């Protein structure tokens, strides 16, 4: 059932219109979902940056402060114990605050961020042990410095990992700049921590001296580069910082330390207290520059998320609108096309089922028809549907032309049949007249029997000629002006058969008269049925003819004892008797029983019903119903023989 539905033109056109629209909608929905997810990731990224910025800033400052105080204490400087304790508490508080954002960072950064967090957690577990060693003075300066640097290296690695998941290239570039600023801050902070050890009398060991020179060179070069690559506001802040007195003082102290070629204490241009104040100012301003740039990147990420959300909504709206409009347009065009197809179907059916049969009936009635005038005139434009209509016009015109040709041929055949039949009929009539004269003059019984046989054969020949006339659409020449008794009519029909001696007419035939205009055709009809009964039954068997009055007229029954007919043959024969087809060569070749065809034509002409059934002896019973309309208004009573006898 479902497969049959998809065979319709309407369904196929709608599917053709619907599939691209659905694909367009799916594409729009997919694009919108992608943009929406991208916007959601950008918003999540922005929220993560915003939530992590303050804890990260606090952690960086706390680590730098504790590192500076720890290195100073290990280098021999007298450090306020309260300040170191406060720095450690600040560091612990920053760690606890940052722990709340680690889960969010792992969600954004994935497994790579998880590895960074795991390494950072491992360092945190070693922090109490390290602090105890610092308080006991058992930890070398280099080890303490390295531990705190590794903590902040973990922060740098985490920031770099997060930057890889930036929602777009612009935000990723800003995060890279922000990470570079963090490196500058950390490098300056590390240099400050080493400066606190370098100003001691013993100075820095060789490995830390090289580290110190690298740090100082790195953050100075990076500040000069970033001042040219940052946006105008941040570049101006960087330029103001490098031109400030605090920057100059810190740079002067760093240069003095770098120029020292031994482990002895350098000659500082300013006091340690002045340097520390200047270093604190520089670090605070660097941190401020870094935080400001980070907030700017976070704001850009938030803007990108909002922009992506708007884009996804816009794309979804536009694509959905276009898809709906495309489908509606396709539906409208499909309905227009289907409407034309329906109109073409209805008009072609009208031509095929109404107009063409009417034309054929007119041809059968002998009306002259012009094929060009009768051809269909369907007009559906010049497109493909119009071309189909024109093709049907041509097909209908060809069919009409063929029908006209066939009608002309049929008329010619009928004329030939009629001509031959009339000629044969004249010859047969003349032959019957001669035989009748010979029978009257002949007294020899043997010769008289021979003449009777010739007379019956001539009568059969006359009936065959009349068959041709009937098939040709004409009427036999024999006519009766007065009503004829049914018994005489039956006996006349039996007399026209060759094997008349085998036919027994029932003595109980109704005493009715048949109108003279019907007598010739009824005799012919009954003679054909009796002749079929004798021809298709054994030579020794008899054929019975009986009759009876019924409400609608008179019924005459002809029964034989032959082989009979199959059910399918009886059905086909009765269909032809009830509705005889038009006379044509094809009709005649389809069924060789010409007599039944003649019976059907004669029966239809006078409203006489003929039906074949199986007889009581296994043969065929022909039931002929003669309607009251063909009976004479006044019927005389005729005495019939009391016993059945052969005719």
Image (cartoon, grey):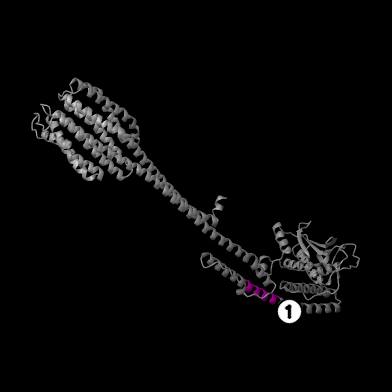
Q: Nearer the viewer, residue 443 or 162?
A: 162
Q: Position of residue 491 (x, y in %)?
A: 84, 68
Where 33 falls versus 381 (above or below)?
above
Where 14 falls versus 399 (above or below)?
above
Residue at 61% over, 63% down: 349
Q: Position of residue 199 (x, y in %)?
A: 12, 29
**In this orientation, does residue 544 appear?**
no
Label 1, residues with CA under 10 Å away: few <14, some 14-19, many ≥20: few
Q: Position of residue 605 (x, y in %)?
A: 76, 69
Q: How many marks?
A: 1
Q: Position of residue 344 (x, y in %)?
A: 58, 63
Q: Quadrant of the C terminus?
A: bottom right
Is 411 part of what is drawn in magenta? yes
Residue 505 location, quadrant: bottom right
Residue 543 location, quadrant: bottom right
Q: Nearer the viewer, residue 634 or 53?
A: 53
Q: Which residue corresponds to mark 1?
A: 423
Where 92 falls versus 505 (above or below)?
above
Is 40 part of what is drawn in magenta? no
What stretch of residues is rendered in magenta? 403-417
Residue 249 location, quadrant: top left
In the visual, does 627 lie left or right of 167? right
Where 383 falls versus 167 (above or below)?
below
Q: Main secondary structure of the magenta part?
A: helix
Outermost residue toward the top in this view: 136
Q: Nearer the viewer, residue 418 or 65?
A: 65
**Element at badge 1?**
helix
**In this orientation, does residue 440 appear?**
yes
Q: Nearer the viewer, residue 367 or 21?
A: 21
In the visual, does 291 lie left or right of 3? left
């Amino acid at each position: 059932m479902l497969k049959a539905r998809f065979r319709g033109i309407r369904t196929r056109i709608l599917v053709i219109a619907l599939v691209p629209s659905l694909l367009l909608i799916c594409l729009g929905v997919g694009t919108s979902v992608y943009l929406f997810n991208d916007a959601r990731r950008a918003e999540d990224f922005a929220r993560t940056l915003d939530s992590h910025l303050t804890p990260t800033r606090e952690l960086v400052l706390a680590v730098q402060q504790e590192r500076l105080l720890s290195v100073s204490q290990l280098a021999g400087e007298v450090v306020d114990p309260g300040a170191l304790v406060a720095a450690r508490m600040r560091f612990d508080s920053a760690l606890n605050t940052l722990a709340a954002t680690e889960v969010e960072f792992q969600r954004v950064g994935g497994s790579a961020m998880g590895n960074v967090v795991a390494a950072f957690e491992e360092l945190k577990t070693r922090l109490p042990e390290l602090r105890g060693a610092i308080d006991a003075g058992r930890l070398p300066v280099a080890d303490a410095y390295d531990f705190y640097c590794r903590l902040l290296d973990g922060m740098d690695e985490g920031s770099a990992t997060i930057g890889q998941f930036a929602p777009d290239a612009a935000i990723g570039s800003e995060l890279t700049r922000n990470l570079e600023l963090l490196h500058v801050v950390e490098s300056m902070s590390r240099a400050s921590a080493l400066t606190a050890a370098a100003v001691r009398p013993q100075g820095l060991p060789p490995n830390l001296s090289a580290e110190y020179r690298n740090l100082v060179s790195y953050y100075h070069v990076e500040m000069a580069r970033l001042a040219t690559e940052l946006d105008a506001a941040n570049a101006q802040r960087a330029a103001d910082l490098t031109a400030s007195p605090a920057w100059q003082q810190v740079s002067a102290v760093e240069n003095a330390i770098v120029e020292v070629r031994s482990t002895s204490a350098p000659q500082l241009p300013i006091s340690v207290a002045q340097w520390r104040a200047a270093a604190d100012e520089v670090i605070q301003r660097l941190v401020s520059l870094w935080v400001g740039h980070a907030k700017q990147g976070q704001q850009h990420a938030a803007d990108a998320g909002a922009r992506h959300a708007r884009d996804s909504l816009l794309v979804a709206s536009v694509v959905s609108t276009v898809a709906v409009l495309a489908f509606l347009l396709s539906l409208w065009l499909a309905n227009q096309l289907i409407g034309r197809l329906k109109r073409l179907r209805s008009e072609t059916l009208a031509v095929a089922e109404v107009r063409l049969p009417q034309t054929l009936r007119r041809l059968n009635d002998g009306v002259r028809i012009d094929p060009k005038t009768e051809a269909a005139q369907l007009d559906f434009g010049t497109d493909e549907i119009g071309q189909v209509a024109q093709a049907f016009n041509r097909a209908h015109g060809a069919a009409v032309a063929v029908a006209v040709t066939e009608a002309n041929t049929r008329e010619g055949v009928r004329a030939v049949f009629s001509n031959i039949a009339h000629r044969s009929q004249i010859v047969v009539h003349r032959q019957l007249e001669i035989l009748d004269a010979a029978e009257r003059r002949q007294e020899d019984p043997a010769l008289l029997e021979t003449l009777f046989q010739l007379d019956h054969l001539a009568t059969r020949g006359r009936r065959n000629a009349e068959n041709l006339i009937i098939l040709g659409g004409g009427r036999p020449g024999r006519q009766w002006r007065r009503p004829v008794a049914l018994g005489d009519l039956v006996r006349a029909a039996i007399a026209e058969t060759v094997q008349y001696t085998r036919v027994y007419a029932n003595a109980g035939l109704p005493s009715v008269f048949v109108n003279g205009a019907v007598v010739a055709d009824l005799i012919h009809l009954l003679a054909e049925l009796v002749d079929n009964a004798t021809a298709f039954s054994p030579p020794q068997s008899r054929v019975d003819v009986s009759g009876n009055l019924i409400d609608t007229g008179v019924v005459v029954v002809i029964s034989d004892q032959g082989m009979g007919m199959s059910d399918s043959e009886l059905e086909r024969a009765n269909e032809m008797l009830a509705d005889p087809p038009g006379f044509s060569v094809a009709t005649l070749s389809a069924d060789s029983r010409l007599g039944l065809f003649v019976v059907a034509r004669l029966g239809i002409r006078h409203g006489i019903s003929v039906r074949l059934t199986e007889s009581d002896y296994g043969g065929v019973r022909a039931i002929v119903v003669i309607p009251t309309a063909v009976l004479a208004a006044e019927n005389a009573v005729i005495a019939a023989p009391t016993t059945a006898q052969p005719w």
